[in-house]
Image (spheres, helix red, strand yellow):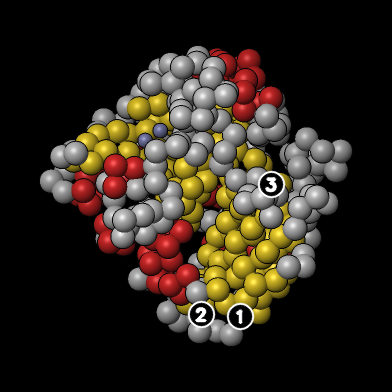
Amino acid sequence: MTLARYLVIAIAVTTGALALATPSSPQALKPSSPASVWYKGQLHTHTLNSDGDSTPDDVVRWYREHGHNFVVITDHNYLTSVDGLNALHGADDKFLVIKGEEVTDRFGDKPIHVNGLDPATLIKPPGGNSVVSMVQNMIDAITAARGVPSINHPNYGWAISADDLTQLQRTRLFEVFNGHPLVNNVGGGGVPGLEETWDRILSSGKLLYGIAVDDAHYFKRPEDTTVPRPGFGWVHVRAQRLEARAIVEALERGDFYSSTGVELQSIDASSKALTIAVKVDRLSKYRIQFIGRQGSVLSEMTATPATYTFKGDEGYVRAKVIESNGKVAWIQPVPVGSSAPK
Ligand SMILES: [Zn+2]
Ligand SMILES: [Zn+2]
């Protein structure tokens, strides 16, 4: 476990902040409280400023009206201004628009897309002489612009392999789930799905966190299953306040979980154990898996809360909650022992 992450957990334990509070709920913690709150947000979406079908105003409105606390606008090679959007839709501790850009290029026939979350300036695609160098150059250009990089849909166009991902430096986030219908999340034809890819990377010693996103482009064709629409994947981020830097910094230290519809009551990670409590829908049933090296299921439980006690040599332990209709939550890996990914 990184020191920063351990401290976050330690602080959360001492402040008793592990129960999740929804900012808009009556039990909401006040913004001035030192305790952390969970904020639901979208990290990847498009507007008419690139190849979306709706204005930034319509896109932001959709997320605000569908229970999100924040949305990052990530148009291709375009940095949409968010000041006017926040003046219209922003609300203290309830809703925030964060600026972003999908830095977009091709290497040969391979689409290479890396999101910059909250960069200070527009980032020009920096080029590169291989897939790995192009992705790395994008990561470094985003970081130089004070943005947080996130590697998009590695299996789209079968562009970025698990081996490529293990070679990348200075980055923490990648999309383990993308709601676009053509991104090959589950793999095929001998190419691993993104969850298997994630375990390969973690097992190789590299610490990456998995995000879930919509990558929505079409807000005006809700019945059309062939196009990327909103409402398929998002994150719940634990942060001190609803502010752009607090959100992206929490993402970089893995203080979040990703979801396609499962909501959690709490995540409690210590140096000894990981405990997950699910916010149960009474019509559904759940499986809670604790997963280690190479994707091996260390333990599976059906009752919530579920605890896995570390043996000490796992390397890492991550959790996954599978709801009986296929909805999923992915909890970020907790490094365990001397061979932990870094
Ligand atoms: Zn893309
Ligand atoms: Zn996109």
The residue carrying mark 2 is 314
The residue carrying mark 1 is 310
Q: Could you tell me how far apart the alpha carbons at marks 1 and 2 are, in whole angstroms?
A: 7 Å
Tell which tag, 1 or 3, sits nearer the viewer: 1
Along the viewing direction, whichever of 331 and 161 lies nearer the viewer: 161
On the question of residue 165 being in view, the answer is: no
Vertical position of residue 135 compared to residue 182: above or below: below
Q: Quadrant of residue 310?
A: bottom right
On the question of residue 88 being in view, the answer is: yes
Dot placed on the residue nearer the N-terminal end, 1 or 3: 3
Give coordinates of residue 15: x percent, y percent.
Answer: 76, 59
Query: Ligand 2 is in which quadrant of the figure?
Result: top left
Q: Which mark is residue 133?
A: none
Along the viewing direction, whichever of 98 and 216 lies nearer the viewer: 216
The residue carrying mark 3 is 38
The furthest residue to the right: 26
Vertical position of residue 308 compared to residue 191: above or below: below
Vertical position of residue 40 compared to residue 162: above or below: above
Circle 2 — which element?
A: loop
